[in-house]
Amino acid sequence: MKNKISILSLKKYIPILCIAFIVGYLIGYALQGTKETSTILYEEGNWGLSFQEQGKAPIGNATSDYLANYNAYYVDNTEEKVIYLTFDAGYENGNTPAILEALKKHNAKATFFIVGNYIETSPDLVKQMVAEGHTVGNHTYHHPDMSKISTKEAFEKEMVDLETLYEQTTGEKMTKFYRPPQGKYSEQNLQMAKELGYHTFFWSLAYVDWYENDQPTKQEAFDKLLTRIHPGAIVLLHSTSKTNGEILDELLTKWEEMGYTFKSLEDLI
């Protein structure tokens, strides 16, 4: 009789035990999924963003905490309405003067990530960037897929060759800011850049502006750049873009009207 009562008593707990088992299983599965996802994201090698909410910073395919291990950034984790303007300059096709004029008008200091070809063909514009208080960063000498470079010697050569040319051209040491060409990277690359004394910068806002013969319209540009701006944004624009040269003054004005101010990456680090 006693055993029968015990069995009946246990039956009361069966639903609770079942629920506990299911919850435990789901938590374990979720954690396993998170770990697998994180590994995929960090080993992906191509910088990417997922915009979740208008006016908020997007989710990068590596977290700010992870990137901080390598002196790397993609956004400033702040509620302050500040924007960090950056331009990738692979070559010069006549749009940089207008960009520099707009920046000067708004007293906005930007960072130009340049390659060897840019210094070779447009040394006067590089000197103008420096004279007007902008930062010139390293986008490598030849703009290769750096994630495929496995030796530190080859990685260092891409960086140092550009540093040397920059110093010969401007008479100044290059600021050790690095942006991986095409946003392609590896954990090994990030470590190499750190060991060379570099800070690596990805971005939290960009749009498709790099196709010279398929430029976005002004409205297409504003649809992306105005709706996705957020506090602490590191904005990537291409100086090769005719659209950027035409809209930058108005774009900066609109951002200012939204309450934003502009800071240099120097302030971020």
Image (cartoon, rainbow, N blue to C red):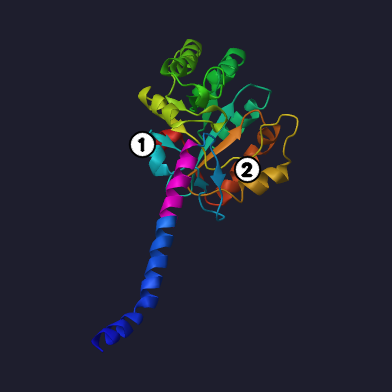
Mark 1 secondary-structure assignment: loop
Give the label, 2 or 1, closer to the camera. Answer: 1
Q: Which residue is mark 2?
A: 251
> Quarter holding the C terminus?
top left
Residue depicted at x 31% and y 82%: 7
**Sequence-first disc among 2 and 1:** 1
Q: Which residue is mark 1?
A: 69
Q: Give the x, y percent position of residue 8.
A: 32, 85
Please state the extent of the stretch shown in magenta in the rendering: 30-43
Q: Nearer the viewer, residue 132 or 116?
A: 116
Residue 208 image-quadrant placement: top right
* Residue 131 against residue 46 in the figure, above or below: above
Judged left or right of residue 208, residue 115 is: left
Mark 2 secondary-structure assignment: helix
Residue placed furthest toward the right: 213
Residue placed furthest toward the top: 168
Q: Give the x, y percent position of residue 77.
A: 42, 47
Q: Does 246 lie within the magenta span?
A: no
- For badge 1, the amino acid type reads Asn
The circle on residue 21 is: none
Q: Give the x, y percent position of residue 243.
A: 70, 35
Q: Does 38 lie within the magenta span?
A: yes
Q: Give the x, y percent position of residue 20.
A: 37, 69
> Quarter holding the N terminus?
bottom left
Q: Nearer the viewer, residue 247 or 7?
A: 7
The crowd level at tag 1 (other Cα within 10 Å; few <14, some 14-19, many 20+) is few
Residue placed furthest toward the left: 2
